[in-house]
Image: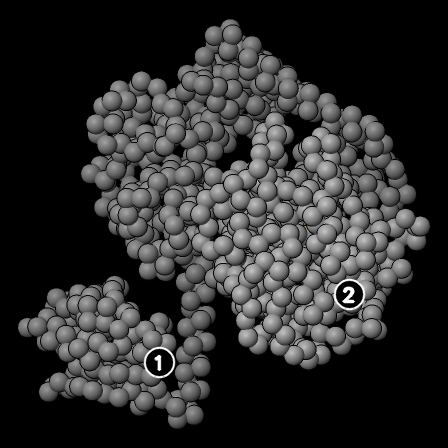
Amino acid sequence: MGGNHRVFDRHKDAGLAQLPSAEPPRSSDGGTAKAAPRIKAMRTTAELREGFLTFFEERDHLRRKSASIIPPADDPTTLFIVAGMQPMKRWFLGEKSDAPRVTTVQKAVRAGGKQNDLDDVGLTNRHLCFLEMLGNFSFGDYFKDGAVDYAWEFVTEHMKLDPERVWASVFAGDPELGLGEDGVAIASWERYLPRERIVGLPRTENFWQAADTGPCGPSSEIYYDRGAEHGCGREDCRPGCECERYLELWNLVFMEFDLADDGALTPLPRQNIDTGMGLERGAMLMQGVESLFDTDTFKPLLDWVGERADAAYGSSEEATKAYRVIVEHARTSSFLVAEGVAPSNEGRGYVLRRVIRRAVQFGRRLGLEPPFLYELGDVVREQMGDVYPELVERRREISELVRGEEERFRETLERGEKLFEEMVAKGEITPDDAFRLHDTYGFPWELTKELAAERGLEVNEEEFTRLMEEQRERSRQASAFEVEVQVKGQRSDFVGYERTDVLTAILAYAELGDGTFQAKLEQSPFYPDGGGQVSDAGYIENEETGARADLISATRLEEDQVLTFQGEGFGEGMRVRAVVPWSVRFPTMANHTATHVLHTALRDVLGEHVRQAGSAVRPDKLRFDFTHPRALTREERDRVEQEVNRVIFENRPVRAFITPIEEARRLGAMMLFGEKYGDEVRVVEIDGYSRELCGGTHVRSTAEIGPFVILSEGSVGSGARRIEAVTSGSAFGLLHERSLEAEELRSELAETRKQARKRGAERDRTAEVVYRDESGDVVVAQVEAIKGSELRDLSDQIRQSKKAAAVLLGSVDDGRVYLVVNVDPSLVDAGVDAVAIAREAAKKIEGGGGGRPNLAEAGGKNPAGLDEAFEVGKSEIAAARG
Ligand code: ATP
Ligand code: MG
């Protein structure tokens, strides 16, 4: 390894060379041949991406945009999209496709499932966790010959790889599948390659399936011989060998089967082609560099790290690996957050957490202190934001979430390291120590081992593993306890709706070891995890002895609950005081009620198709998933936020009641689709606004929620969106922060304006005033192509400099029309409403409008209507002023 940017002499400048003359593309299956190719000479990653798509477009393929990395809700077979074919599964299974031929570049993440390359990142030259996959697809159109023809032409004539170094593998057959060697693929290849460079490989290599079930088929891979100097030197080194000599570039899959649960293969209705070429691998070969990380896309990322690290890229194997892991994970984390994934302890969120933490760990080896990864995310955005605009749209979330996770991990590491030092001070690190670091403090075992080694200490790994096993055993016992108490029929009485502080007794008790125990209380104020609301935090204490145990979790057991605590000095029958601190419970209630308001507000603003798809109510924030086919516009998002706050400040009473399910249905209470409810249900009603079946804890009236602020809105799979929001104290904190930021911005802006004025470039002179009324205090003007805050600011400037009572500005930018109506507050008091004026005027430009009574905006798609809109605006203003 190392940072050796080796270049193959032979095709050093290949990518820059002119293309050969416009020979019509061959197509053995009768596809139409086109005139001169538009495909340009390729060298950079961006050129390869575009060149590939153009090549196939010219050959009658429909270019489709990359689908989300999150698989559609109805495809639970993988955690992430791992290949280009996945979003089109239904077309392979026989549903009619948009076109018989399709080409895409698809974002993919290979982590946390069967296709898991996360741990290979940095170990090999050819694996990434996030990658872009180029593909061409045929749905019952061309088959093996066609796919091989296209691939051969693209690789040799456009990528200009040396034909003498190209190899192909084909499926060697498998008795279990009842399939023999793929003779057809061999024949297809023999038209281009000598038989010795066509090798048969087993099912593990050359039978492709994205998951355990679904469309699949034998495949044929294109390999490139990078030269003996990259190889293992073994006599039988061939494609399929794990060394770095033969690089797999492109997989052509002959999708003709559907694999069932029981392993049975059924032929698909059509014979299809699905191919996947790793974009980065293609760039690596074209550029003749040592690894994926030495291609052009990664260069600025490596440079960024290089400016901050205390060892150079390539200075040692260790350093090179650390650089590669960091830059890779900067990409993966940016793309995952852009898709709405947030760090957590399970599923996709856990992959994101691992990726960020892994980057931080490798960063520390180079002397980079967290948080740093979030800044590297900016470089990723600069690199790829034009192809993937979600990186730009979500820049704030990416930066905040990555940074937050880095900071949490830094705290974990610092706490762990402090403890570690204390442990070292006593001369050794026992397996118990290592286990405690891992289990209680989340300190990675690998790091303990490493730090210990640095000090010449060794930790008994076998013993550590045994402790981990015991821990697993304890969780099994814990579930045994749950069964036992249920059999005994000792039920807890949940009193948490009314009380957060009760004197009660321990009904059942079981030691779990390691200072933890499980218990059931006669009366419990603790809300057990469920219905989207997380388990309460809190404690129990024995007021006589002063013993105290903290609640780790409250778990639901049908109608009952079981509590797990950390602490000592308790036992069955003991009287205890059980407390949920108000500082935890209150914000949780506020968030839960806000979730209900949000649900109804979304249906009001977006439409009745909105259905709840999941939620998480916690003390610090709330999350709400719902069905909706596309991202919310800025305006929709604002309207939702405003609507929720409106209902909050109307201070509507909130009450809960138990009723038969039929009655709840009759009342139109919202229920979760697919959920099973008992005969009697609990309905939470917000007076005059909404009714939902819900077992959660709620505030007594909406005003208790306090301000409601949306943190983010994003996708969680096809057709589902997620909103994260804060209320009460957290919302106030956020608003305060934002107002400080805005203040800073304002002073920056004021400074910029001052400079601009100095240069004599005062904007409003460029405004062509089309109308001033007699008193001179209504200004109507068309201005140069500006919109949004610039247009608003200009209207303020004009209103002040011209001492106008009302200003109506219009502008045309990129085929769209923008209007702003700005009226003096004294007019608002007198009953003039800018919003109403903007909405009326908007009709003329085929658009809509909104805003506040003194400042409203409209946007539309008909520039020709601008003059009419001005007329309407003028008469509306005149009428409103009476
Ligand atoms: P390998 O055996 O090298 O891991 P694979 O068999 O997993 O590759 P496929 O599942 O066939 O690869 O994916 C199709 C193409 O995507 C590959 O030919 C390769 O160009 C690219 N590819 C696959 N995995 C990665 C990865 N982790 N990083 C970069 N490119 C990849
Ligand atoms: Mg692989």
Horizontally, residue 162 falls left or right of residue 600, namely right
User: Which residue sits furthest left?
Assistant: 882
Nearest to the eye among marks 2 and 1: give it: 2
Q: Where is mark 2, residue-wise? A: 163
Dot 1 lies on which element? loop
Q: In the picture shown, does residue 513 fall above or below 27? A: above
Residue depicted at 55% across the width and 75% down the height: 35
Residue 336 visible in rendering: no
Three-letter amino acid code at the position of disc 2? Pro
Residue type pointed to by label 1 = Ala
**Disc 2: residue Cβ within 8 A of ligand 1's nearest atom:** no
Kindly indicate the quadrant of the structure image that contains residue 549. top right
Q: Which type of secondary structure does the marked residue at label 2 adopt? A: helix
Residue 3 appears in which quarter of the rendering?
Answer: bottom right
Q: Position of residue 578 (x, y in %)?
A: 48, 23
Which residue is more in the foreground, 216 or 465?
A: 216
250 vs 635, left or right, is right
Q: Residue at x 28, y 22 (%)?
A: 661
**Could you say which is closer to the camera, residue 190 or residue 98?**
190
Residue 747 image position (x, y, % from top left): 43, 75
Closer to the chain start, of discs 2 and 1, is 2
